Structures are given as structure tokens and as C-alpha cells.
Amino acid sequence: MQHLRDKKILLGITGSIAAYKSCELTRLLSKEGADVEVMLTEAAATLVGPVTFEALSGKKVWTSLWNNPAQPIPHIDLQRNKDLFLIAPATANIIAKIANGIADDLVTSVASARTCPLMIVPAMNVHMWQNEPNQRNVELLRADGVFFSGPVSGSQACGDIGKGRFKEPSEIVEDIISFFSPKVLAKKTVVMTAGPTFESIDPVRGITNRSSGRQGFDIARCAQRSGATVHLVAGPSSQKTPEGVIRYDVLSTEQMLDKVLELCKSNHPDLFIAVAAVSDFRSKTSSQEKIKKVPGVDEMTLTLVKNPDILATVAALDNGPLCIGFAAESENLINYARSKLERKKVRMIVANSVSAIDQTDNDATFVFEDHEEPLGKMSKEELAQRIIDKASDLLKEKVR
Ligand code: CTP
């Protein structure tokens, strides 16, 4: 899925050592379908050559206000019809100039002539970032409606450690995708579960399942991009936490329920989405020591007890959130899904086949009390966005 298809992005690169990372940034933006046109300041061009960016963007790279026969007034024409002007990396110098309306080279002249939104990705030494004039300039730009991606904390090229580091290119791309995403869940709070649970039997063994957590993490990412504050309670999963999502790692179903209830109490979420493949049963006892084989004994019995139902518990809360659940079934999909909807008293069930577990695609149906909406096969990420769009519609109806 290309998230930036048809987006025209003008990328200004300035003289920070992080300029080499903008090669990767250009590649990732193009991979997401964006049409990228690159400008380099004189300092940036001494760090990374224009030919590299020409190869990565497939377009002529601009380095000067002057001597451009194909583009006699580049500072006006280059930003025309662009969806975003991105300056990455941005030095303290370029931030100071733009904040104060100075236009003495191609990048700053484009900034002063621009009619499209501007996003700045700073990269500089921690002391330069903290320097009061720089902080004043950043505030001026924010007040002017300029967006910032980063900087982040970490080790720096000079050996110092602190804030000022260039964000990773993939995280900048995520910020840009978020920037363009319609904010259908603006000011909403979402609590959700994802991944499998792990019910321990002894210190090394337990009951779990093959859920990767991918569908839940995709939903969390889409909800975050859509403007929501997202609290994700995750069972053991190797999925990367989506940028901006607040993640709480748990193991067992009981821990998952405790965390979800705590979050519901303290955050009063608008929406609860139960995506976790929760273990319905746990071992009645969990041994402190590793269970050993007993010579001559070929069978062992494990007594299981039922786990609490997280979704049904949240759905029964007074003034609780709008609840959406999943049903993963091997047969009788719609009937089972509808019976879950009724039993757990939730507004919508996303019904899908168990074969979707651990896969990248899903073929789901939205099941409601009185009708269903089959969606057909699509990527889990696309399905995630459809769920968020539907949740936003349901929230507007104000019916739990
Ligand atoms: N769920 C939950 N807590 C549980 C079991 C399930 O919150 N203890 C949620 C799941 O996250 C999912 C929905 O309930 O959103 C349905 O889960 P599923 O495992 O398909 O159904 P079960 O409730 O286990 O019912 P059954 O055993 O009949 O399949």
C-alpha cells in the first residue's frame, strides 16, 4: 500500500552531517508513491552530491537560484502545486533564517515564497538545539504554523549525547503519512488489545497461540495517524510499536484485563477495540520450578480454568467506550460472529477466518446487530483503516 501516492513533496536538504540520511529518506518517500523533487544548499552539496539525489528521485536536483535555464524563477515555480515542503535535515542556521524571513539562497527563498505547508526535521548538536536563540526561532516557526518532525535524543556525530538528533528516515515518513491522514479520530482516546496472551505453566512453559499481533498493531497505527491518543495493551509480540502509540506489555489474560480496566478508569476512552487472540483458559496452577519428567510416568494432566472475557467486561462498564471485537472462526463465520456480538453486547464484530492468523492479508466482514458488510480480501493495513473509518462513523452515531 503506497500511502503518499500522488503527493508532491519538495525536499530541501541543508548542511548537516545527517544529509546522508536524506538519501534513504528520498528513497522511502518515492517508495511510498510520493513525487519528490530535491533542492540542496551549497553546504549540503559539499556533503552529498546532487547526482545521488537525481538517481534516487529520478528528477533534476536544484542547487542554486541562478543559471537554471529550464527554471528561470525557481523559488516561485518549484513550490507551486506542491503538497508539502520538507526541509530535512534542517540546521540551526536555516531555522534562524526562515523564522526571521531571510531569503538569501534557493532553499530560504522557496520557504519565503511557499504557499504549501512546511515541515522541518532539525538535526544539530544538543547545545545548538538548546541554544536560546534557536529555541526562540523554533517557537516562532511553530506559531507560524510550521510542523516539526523531531529532533530526537541520542548519540551525535560529535560524540555528545542529547536532543538534536535527526529522526530516522522511516519515522519521518511515518510523520508525513500522519500529516496527510484525515483526522477522523481527532481528540478521541482509544484503548485496545493486540497479540496473543501467554498463560504460564512453569517458569519456561505456557499456553499461547500463533497470533503475530500484526492486525492489532496496524489498527493502532491507523488510529494514531487518524488523530487519536492510542493506548495499546499488547501480549508477547515482536511487532514494532507504531510511532506515537503508548504501549503496555503484558503476558497473561488477567494482566491484560487489569491494564485495560486501569486505562478505562483513568482515560475514559471513546473507543475500545479488542484485537488480542486471548487465551480462553489458563492453567489452574503455575509451578515456581520447572516441571520435570517422572521416570515411568507417560501421562500428565493439566487442569485449565476459564479466563475472564476482557471485551465483555469493558462492554458492561457504566458509561464505557464504544466496543469493537473480532471473531476468528474456522467455520460458520457470520453466525458465530453475530452470537459473539450479542453475548458480549458490543456494537460491531470484525469477522475473519482463522486462516488470517500470521498472514499479511485478511478477508473480513463487519457484523452488526441487523446487517453485515463484507469487505473482501485486502491487506491487514487496509482493513485497519477501514475499521478506524467505521469506528469514526459509529462514534458520530453516539450509540454504544
Ligand atoms: N476476547 C476477550 N477476552 C477473552 C476472549 C476473547 O477480550 N477472554 C475478545 C477477543 O479479543 C475478540 C473477541 O473477544 O475481540 C472474540 O474472541 P474469540 O476468541 O474469537 O471468541 P471467544 O470469546 O473466545 O469465543 P469462542 O470460544 O466461542 O470462539
Image (cartoon, rainbow, N blue to C red):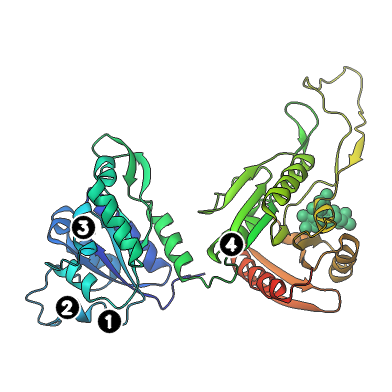
| Left or right, residue 273 beside residue 15 | right
Residue indicated by mark 4: 228
Q: Earlier in the sequence, mark 4 or mark 3?
A: 3
Q: Residue at x 67, y 48 (%)?
A: 233
Q: Earlier in the sequence, mark 4 or mark 1?
A: 1
Q: Earlier in the sequence, mark 3 or mark 2?
A: 2
Secondary element under disc 2, as helix, strand or loop, is helix
Residue indicated by mark 3: 96
Q: How many marks?
A: 4
The kind of residue tagged 2 is Pro
Residue 360 in percent (x, y) is at 62, 61
| Callout 3 crowding tier (Cα within 10 Å): few <14, some 14–19, many ≥20 | some
Q: Closer to the observer: label 4 or label 1?
A: 4
State which image quarter holds ligand 1: bottom right
Q: Residue at x 72, y 59 (%)?
A: 272
Q: Badges 4 and 3: C-beta atoms under 8 Å apart?
A: no
Residue 69 in percent (x, y) is at 9, 82
| Callout 1 crowding tier (Cα within 10 Å): few <14, some 14–19, many ≥20 | some
Q: Closer to the observer: label 3 or label 2?
A: 3
> Alpha carbon of mark 3 to alpha carbon of mark 1: how far?
24 Å
Asked whether mark 2 and ligand 1 are closer than 8 Å, the reply comes as: no
Residue indicated by mark 1: 80
Query: What is the quadrant of residue 63 in the picture?
Result: bottom left
The kind of residue tagged 1 is Arg
Query: What is the quadrant of residue 170 in the picture?
Result: bottom left
